[in-house]
Image: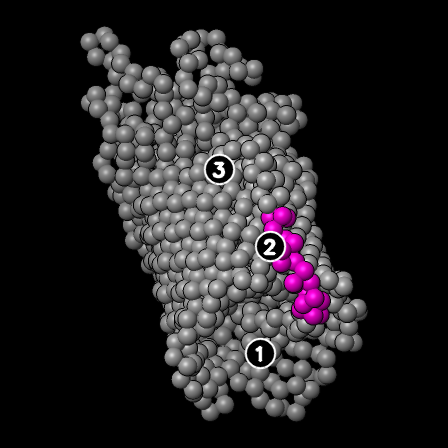
Amino acid sequence: MKAGFLVGGAAIALVQMVPFTAQARLAAAGDDATAGADAPEDIIVTGTRQTGIRAADSAAPVQVLDTTALAHVGQPDLTQVLSQLAPSFTSQALGGDSGNLTTSARLRGLSANHVLVLVNGKRRHGTANLQVTTGPYQGGAAPDLDLIPPEAIERIEILQDGAAAQYGSDAIAGVINIILKKDRAGGVANITAGQYGVGDGETLAGTTRLALPLGGNGFLDVTALHRFHDYSQRGGADRRVSNPDGTLLPGVPAAWANIPGFPRLNPLLGDARLSLTTATINAGYDFGSVEAYAFGTYGRRLARSRQQYRLPNRVSRTANGITVFPFPNGFVPKIGLQEEDFSGTGGLRGALAGWNWDLSATYGRDKAKISTLDSANASLYTDTGFTPRDFYDGAFLASQFTGNLDLRRTVDVGLAAPLTIAFGGEYRRDVYEIRSGDEASRYKEGGQAYPGFQPTDAAVRRRHAWSGYIDAATQPLTGWTVDLAGRFEHYSDVGNTTIGKISTRYDVSPAFGLRGTASTGFRAPTLAESFYSATNVSPAYAIVQLPANSAAAALTGFSPLTPEKSTNFSGGLVWRGLPKLTITLDAYQIRIKKRIAASGLVLGRFGTFVINQTVLDAITAQGTVIDPAAAFVGVSAFTNGVDTRTRGVELSVNYATELPNARIDWSLAANYNRTTITHNRLGDNLFGPTAQSNLETASPRFKAVLGALVTHGPISLNVRETVYGKSSTLASPSGTAPFYRATVTKAAITDLELAYESDAGLRLAIGANNLFDKRPPNASSVPGSVGTPTAGPQSILGVEMYDAPLVIAPYGFNGGYYYIRAGVRF
């Protein structure tokens, strides 16, 4: 494993450097550690309108990830950082089609759309690239976290509580508030290089950050990141051409055994290749009575994802009795993405007549151009003898404008603490657009892997929303805090709602406190959920995603989307009975009525046998032409299909051990939850076993992160152990009964980083994510997996592969990632 040798050699070099400066730092280490232990905890700004509240004093659970925690994760993308540090946060290992180019994540096992993402307390726009392929992340159109460089972040506050009444729609599962750095001097430059243990998935990332003063009362903090990540390949032998032992199947032309890569011809299971450039700017100036601030982000992503291998006989043309196969080795289509994303916020804040006020405006837009590369349009070649290899399939655009006015003041009303009153208003405009592809991309069934968007798919959809809120918090009695919040929202397309929240906390003693919340929530369907339309294809499948609010969907039996409604209850305790020790334990329940989720596959045709003519009529009504070679033809749509209940418990323990010349910061964070479908509104025909398992069992119910950060002079050692419970999904190669359960058993993943920082600011680190190269089981070795009741290949959209890893594994399927990092702080 060449990555292991790389890390090992770098470790020896790093250790050899330590003695030169270690002795100079040992004397100061004890003083620094003591100062850090006695320093006050970070003041939070999320989940409360009050000021000066620490995370441990909050009435709702808030996890804070500071700069130190963020700096010791080897992956240079924010989604992976959060996945490794936050137990309630899980990320997607593999997306289908264009979804593999911008993967998604979720909180507490709910949808990615149930999490509100803020930057400096302001709402961030979502991605235009909707997650469409079947799975637990289907329908996700949340903000793309990877477009924010981790080096630009001062801290991340994760409110693990329903907060729709405080912040508006989206905050049913919680809030992620990303606070950007705002220094007036200094900077950082670093470079990270890494790869997977098998030698692929090479990553190279460089980050530069510079902070400058603006006059005497201002700051400018700028960060830029460029990251390259190469393909990985974890697919097994392709069952269409080979036996389990890799030999050629009977009846397959002998020449196919000479195709490069045989029998592992299908590279679908793997990371996309990407080149990502992102930048952030954060600025502010204090004029005295008024402070002006501005911040923004820019991102550009070029990516391509390898799709299902097409056999040599997939494209052909017969003329004058002669059949021509233009691709004697077959071909691997690729889906390409050219994405441009930007966001900008500007505002003023100050104090007037006893009120603190904040007036701001934010605009963000994400544009994703989709192409199919190295492909072919089989029907176009058959009809004309010509096909392009590259196709422009169309584009997605999503934009959001938000204007806010917030006011807050404290009033002495004779209670144990002043009353904090806050109120404000918000206007939001959302736009979602689909643009059609070129003519060759949509001629009949279109290019292999990803047909272009038809003119009937193309549309521009808009929504306007107005909201107002009021919040009041005080202490009626010493040690007892009560916080009430109410919110009214009006949407131009789905009507009005009024929601509320009550939070309370009682400190029995300085060491022990009890807390709890109760709230109602509301989430309007995203415009993408309501109007997205496309065709997902493989060599065996053609699945038409019908727009939920279309006549074609209604013909199949689906109804237009309506808002979700939720209730959220939580209760917990905080214990600080020992110096440097904090323990929090919170239980919660989230009920969602009319939850929006993707339906199961509703088959219209299996081979030449028509299962449901209405489905085929709906496809025709949508204006979609299906590849005649597809063995399975069906539809799916987003729907208010189910009511769900999620119950869980979250534990957090933090403790610091002071040693004569060192310090150990211990942390334990764990989350257990279980989602249950309490009512299937559509029945098993439209929301079947696979769709149900995506909500109930596809994410692990248990996740715990145990960490120890050892600091000894200039040296630090960070060890993190993440334990995942089992996860499973029901699936069937045919999409119909019988269904088989594929299970990823519980696993422990070890992350390790050894780092050195000199007095001059030179920083060196080596590390590993998934040190011991843990991988999920292969489908062919999992009893009861997809294929047969006992064992068999994994079916990926109808193409079965032997020895293919189960892609639902929460820790991914690529195995160990090993890296080195060098940088300088100035």
Q: Which amino acid lies under the numbered mark 2 shown in the image of this protein?
A: Tyr
Q: Which amino acid lies under the numbered mark 1 shown in the image of this protein?
A: Thr
Tell me what residue is drawn at x 48 percent, y 86 percent: 355
Which residue matches tag 1? 51
| Foreground residue among 814 and 657 | 657
Which residue matches tag 3? 201
Dot 3: few (<14), some (14–19), or many (≥20) neighbours within 10 Å?
many
Mark found first going from the N terminus, 1 or 3: 1
Percent of width and height locating residue 549: 38, 49
Q: Please provide the residue range marked out in magenta.
A: 14-34
Mark found first going from the N terminus, 3 or 2: 3
Q: Are the two marked residues, 3 and 2, in contact with CB atoms closer than 8 angstroms?
A: no
Which residue matches tag 2? 756
Q: Mostly what secondary structure, the magenta segment? A: helix
Dot 1: few (<14), some (14–19), or many (≥20) neighbours within 10 Å?
few
Q: Are the two marked residues, 1 and 3, in contact with CB atoms closer than 8 angstroms?
A: no
Is residue 14 depicted above or below 376 in this figure? Answer: below
